[in-house]
Amino acid sequence: MSDKPLAPAIEGWHTMGDQPHLIGTRCTACGTYFFPKQSHYCKNPDCDSTDFEEVELSRTGTVWSYTNACYEPPAPFVAPQPFEPYAIAAVQLEAEQMVVLGQVVTGVDTEQLSVGMPVELVLETLHETDDDIKVTWKWKPVAA
Amino acid sequence: MSNEIAILGAGMHPWGKWGHNFVQYGVAAAREALADAGVPWRDVRFVSGGATVRCGYPGYVAGATFAQALGWQGAEVNTSYAACASGSQALAAARNKILSGECEVALVVGADTTPKGFLAPAGGYRPEDPDWVRFYLGITNPTYFALYARRRMDLYGDTQEDFAQVKVKNARAGSKNPRARYRKCFSVEDVAASAMVADPLRLMDICATSDGGAALIVSSLDYARRIGKADAPRVAAISTVTPSFASGVVEMPDIATDSAAAAGIEAQSFRASLPVKAYEEAGIGPEDVNVAEVYDLSTALELDWIEDLQLAPRGEAAQLLRNGDTAIGGRIPVNPSGGLACFGEAVPAQALAQVCELTWQLRGQSGDRQVEGAKVGITANQGLFGHGSSVIVKR
C-alpha cells in the first residue's frame, strides 16, 4: 500500500472519513431525493420546483439484490492486475425510498450476501493514479 | 374507425457476425419484405428506418440511407432512434402516416453491425454521463441482468437450472430457425459448464450482440384489400410509453433508481407498464395471447417478461417453464423464434425481428417451430434511457 493521499474517484459524490455518506440533493418542495445530485429541475411529474438542498443520504440500507463481476470491465474501469472478481449490491435506502448500486467491499463474495441483508456504506480503493489513491463508496454487510 | 394497419410483408437478413456494412443487411431484409408483400418498391411512399448509432452518419439517418440504397424514388423518409425500441418507434411512425391518410404503403427497416465484447462508453472523465459512471465503478450490462435474476431466486425460489432451461428451450426453437445465428441445441449441463459472468448468470444465460437486419411492409387495410390481402396479419397496438416516476427498478445505465419519497409517489416497474397500453389499445387481454416474443437479454429476464406481460402471476413464470407451457406445443409459447438467445441483439433491427416472427407465426409459415393456430401475438422489449415497446399483432 502506498502513502499517497486519498481522493474521491468522483469528486463531490460522497463525504470522506470513517462514517462516509453519499451526497445527494433533496427537492425542498416535494421531498424527492436525487443521487447523483440534481439541482436544476425536479423529476417528480407533479413538481416544478427548482429549489434543492444538498443532503447526506442514509449510510445504511438493505440489499435489494446482488451479483458479482467475474470478468474485467472495459475502460474507464481501471482493473488491478491480475483481475480479482468483486461483488456488487443494489441497496434500498429506507428514508430516501431509492436503490443505489455499488461494489461490495473486498473479501465479501455473493455467498455471504442475501436479499434484505443490512449493509452500510464505507470507502475503499477503486484504483491508484500517479498522484493519489482514488476511493469510492462500497457496501459492507453490517456485523450481526 | 380502426387504428389497425396490415402487415403485407416481412423480411430478415440472417443474424450473425458478418462484419459487413449495415446497409447491406437492411437492403436484403427490405427486398425480402417487398417480395413477400408482392409490392413494387415504387409503391412505397414512406421509408421509416431504425437508426444505428454505431455506424457513423449513415446510421443516424438510416431511413434515408436505406431509401437511397434501394433507389431514390421520391418517398418521404423518417429515422427513429429509441435504443432497443427503435424498430417499434419506426413502425409507429409508419402507422401514423398510414392512419392519417398521407400514405398507403410504408417500408419499416432496421439493421446493425455491432462490435465485439462489452458495449463500452466514450472515454475521458465524464461524471455527468451515467453510462460513464457505471463503467468506471465496474458495473457492466450483465450486472443489471444478474441483479434481476438473483432477486428472482431469493424472492420466488427460481433456480439456476430454471434459467438454464430457458436457454435449452430457446436453443431448441432456434435450431429450427434458418435466420437465427446460433442453431445448436444445448443441455442444462452445457449451460452449467459455461463460465460464470455475473452470479447467478453464466455465459450461456446472456445474449450476444449480432449483425442483422429486419424489415416490414405495412399498409392501410384498404390497400391490403385491394391487392387481395384482406386477411393479412395486422398491427393491433404499439406501445412505446415512457416509465412512470418513480421508477423503482434500477435500470441500465443508472447507478440509482428514482426516489419515491415524495407524497403521492409510488415505485413503479417500467417493464410491467409497457404491455398495459398495448392491451388497452388492442382491446384484448393477456388471456387472448397465443404467442409472445420477448427480449431475453438474459434467460432469467424472459421469466420477468412473462410476468410483466401478465401471462403468469408475479413469481410464477418458472412454474410455467417447468410445466412446458412456454415451449412450442405448450399453452403459451414464448420466443418460438429462439429469441435473443439464438439471435443475439442487433439493436435497431430487434424489435422488428420480433414482429417478423409473429407475422410468420400468424400466417402459419413457421415450419417446425410453428405455434399451431396462433391468432394473437405480443412482443416486448426494453432498452436504455426509458425506451421500450410492446406490439400486438393479430389475424
Image: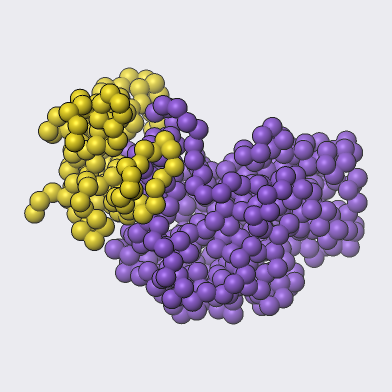
Chain colours: A yellow, B purple
Q: Nearer the viewer, residue A28 or B2?
A: A28
Q: Nearer the viewer, residue B223 or B202?
A: B202
Quarter the C terminus of chain B occupies: bottom right
Kindly indicate the quadrant of the structure image that contains residue B228.
Answer: bottom right
- Residue B35: where, in percent of width, then height? 86, 58
Q: Report if residue A11 is visible in the image.
A: yes
Residue in view at x 68 percent, y 53 percent: B18
Q: Determine whether B323 is above or below B22 in the image.
A: below
- Residue A139: where, in percent of width, then height? 22, 44
Left or right of residue A65, residue B74 in this image: right
Left or right of residue B77, residue A3 in this image: left
Q: Determine whether B340 is above or below B124 in the image.
A: below
Q: Report if residue A116 is visible in the image.
A: no
- Residue A30: where, in percent of width, then height? 31, 29
Residue in view at x 81 percent, y 57 percent: B32
Kindly indicate the quadrant of the structure image that contains residue B60.
Answer: top right
Kindly indicate the quadrant of the structure image that contains residue B333.
Answer: bottom right
Residue ranking furthest to the left: A144
Residue in view at x 91 percent, y 51 percent: B40
Residue in view at x 33 percent, y 48 percent: A83
Total number of numbered discs in the rendering: 0
Left or right of residue B101, residue B163 in this image: left
- Residue B63: where, in percent of width, then height? 75, 39
